[in-house]
Amino acid sequence: VHTFFFSPIKNLSNLNSKRIHVNNPSAKRKGVGLLKDYRLDFGRFSERWKGAVATVVPDKGEEVWGAIWEIDSKDMDNLDK
């Protein structure tokens, strides 16, 4: 079992319970999380999405709110589908 943090902008579809279960049926929402000393960044272009790719990067004093999910190892390869 792995625990993941998804920020609202970086992984918007993974915040939706119905959507995350399409490819990750073992997902269990554990709560809301705060990632301190990080900020959202849009550092590269994706040919797949035809737009910027969001990520989180270290940045002292900043914070990112998101959801915490627990996912079985068998679903790991499905996270970005």
Image: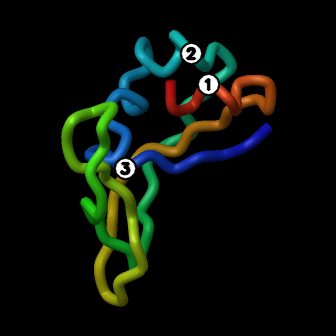
Neighbour tally class for label 3: few under 14, some 14-19, many 20 plus, Cα within 10 Å:
many
Q: CA distance from mark 3 to mark 2?
A: 18 Å
Neighbour tally class for label 2: few under 14, some 14-19, many 20 plus, Cα within 10 Å:
some
Q: CA distance from mark 2 to mark 1?
A: 6 Å
Q: Decide which of tag 2 and tag 1 comes sooner along the chain.
A: 2
Name the kind of residue labelled 2 in the image. Asn
- The residue tagged 3 is 7
Q: Which mark is residue 23?
A: 2
Quadrant of the image occupied by residue 64: bottom left
Q: CA distance from mark 1 to mark 3?
A: 18 Å
Q: Decide which of tag 1 and tag 3 comes sooner along the chain.
A: 3
Q: Quadrant of the N terminus?
A: top right
Q: Residue 34 location in percent, x, y?
A: 41, 63
Q: Decide which of tag 3 and tag 2 comes sooner along the chain.
A: 3
Q: How many marks?
A: 3
The secondary element bearing badge 3 is classed as: loop
Q: Residue at x 40, y 72 (%)?
A: 57
Q: Are marks 2 and 1 in contact (CB under 8 Å)?
A: yes
Q: Residue at x 61, y 25 (%)?
A: 78
